[in-house]
Image: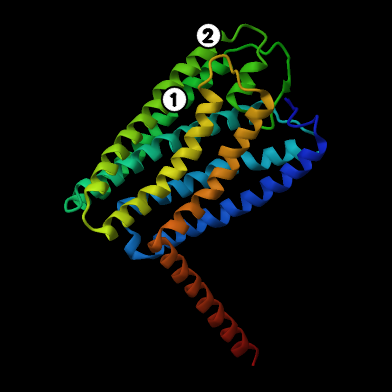
């Protein structure tokens, strides 16, 4: 396939390639730091941080699946991608995107349980249940990806190899078909309603109950802590679902192509890089764990330098 990207705006492609590179580096550093900090600090071995580690790992996989080819299609001299690579990217892209959608749902349930059942929280959200929830998320998302992949791959392209996008995204792949795609588009729309809107409604219901419980708290410190924890998650949910709904839940792909590309950049590149910042800025435990991680790294560096001097002497 030949990827059009933003070929009509060459200067914009130069700017976007720089922006994508910067945000990708932030994503790698931020999410890796959260994973390491939460693993090394025993205080963060709780269900909430277990899900946060999974979200960070997912963001790393999601962006790494997309960014290298995206940079080639934005700035490279030959903006092409092979059919096999495009199929793999589309398949993995849909799979990981569906996982994040459902994972945010389970994270809201975790917060709901922590506030409504604080004394039984660790019993209810035991390691076995958390692991089952993660396996369920990956399995359901895999099934959804296979269905969407099958619907799209059955459409003939009639040797139309111009992909009006910088990655192999479902709406762009549907548009290169040379037959009527109304049935496929409505099927994608229906699946989006089932998965995206159902998940979002469950999250909103959970936070409706959480808000009522928080307002009834007599302790201002307790209210602040609950709002701080839930506020980070709600911010991430708003960014992720907002872009997804705009892109996928419009019958007939009514979004303009350039707007669709910008929103794709937002939820595939910018959102994963902002997740660590959002959780770090609002979470004292994560900030303390990161400071501890930096101290350990600094001390290890001092020991290495000391050993090196000793050997040289």
- Marks 1, 2: nearer the viewer: 2
First in sequence, mark 1 or 2: give its number: 1
The residue shown at (80%, 33%) is 9
The picture places residue 49, in percent across and down from the top left corner, at 36, 53
Figure check: 75 above or below 147: below
Q: Quadrant of residue 308?
A: bottom right
Label 2: how many Cα within 10 Å (few below 14, some 14–19, many 20+): few
One can see residue 77 in this view: no
* 292 displayed left or right of 79: left
Q: State which quarter of the image contains the N terminus.
A: top right
The residue shown at (42%, 51%) is 53
The picture places residue 222, in percent across and down from the top left corner, at 27, 57
The residue shown at (35%, 35%) is 203
Label 1 sits on residue: 144
The picture places residue 271, in percent across and down from the top left corner, at 54, 43
Label 2 sits on residue: 183
């Amino acid at each position: 396939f030949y990827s059009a990207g933003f070929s009509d705006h060459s200067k914009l492609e130069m700017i976007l390639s720089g922006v994508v590179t910067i945000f990708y580096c932030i994503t790698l550093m931020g999410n890796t730091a959260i994973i390491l900090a939460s693993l090394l600090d025993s205080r963060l071995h709780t269900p909430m941080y277990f899900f946060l580690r999974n979200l960070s790992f997912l963001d790393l996989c999601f962006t790494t699946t997309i960014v290298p080819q995206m940079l080639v299609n934005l700035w490279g001299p030959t903006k092409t991608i092979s059919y096999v690579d495009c199929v793999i990217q589309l398949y993995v892209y849909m799979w990981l995107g569906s996982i994040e959608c459902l994972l945010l749902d389970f994270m809201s349930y975790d917060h709901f349980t922590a506030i409504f059942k604080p004394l039984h929280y660790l019993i209810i959200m035991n390691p076995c249940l958390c692991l089952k929830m993660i396996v369920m998320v990956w399995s359901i998302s895999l099934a959804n990806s296979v269905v969407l992949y099958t619907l799209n791959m059955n459409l003939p392209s009639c040797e139309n190899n111009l992909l009006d996008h910088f990655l192999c995204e479902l709406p762009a792949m549907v548009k290169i078909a040379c037959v009527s795609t109304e049935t496929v588009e409505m099927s994608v729309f229906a699946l989006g309603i089932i998965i995206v809107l159902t998940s979002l409604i469950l999250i909103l219901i959970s936070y409706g109950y959480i808000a009522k419980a928080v307002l009834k708290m007599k302790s201002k410190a307790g209210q602040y802590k609950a709002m701080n924890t839930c506020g980070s998650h709600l911010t991430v949910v708003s960014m992720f679902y907002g872009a997804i709904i705009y892109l996928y839940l419009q019958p007939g792909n009514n979004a303009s192509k350039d707007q669709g590309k910008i929103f794709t950049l937002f939820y595939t590149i910018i959102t994963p890089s902002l997740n660590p910042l959002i959780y770090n800025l609002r979470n004292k435990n994560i900030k303390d764990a990161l400071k501890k991680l930096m101290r350990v790294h600094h001390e290890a560096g001092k020991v290495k330098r000391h050993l090196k001097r000793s050997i040289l002497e």
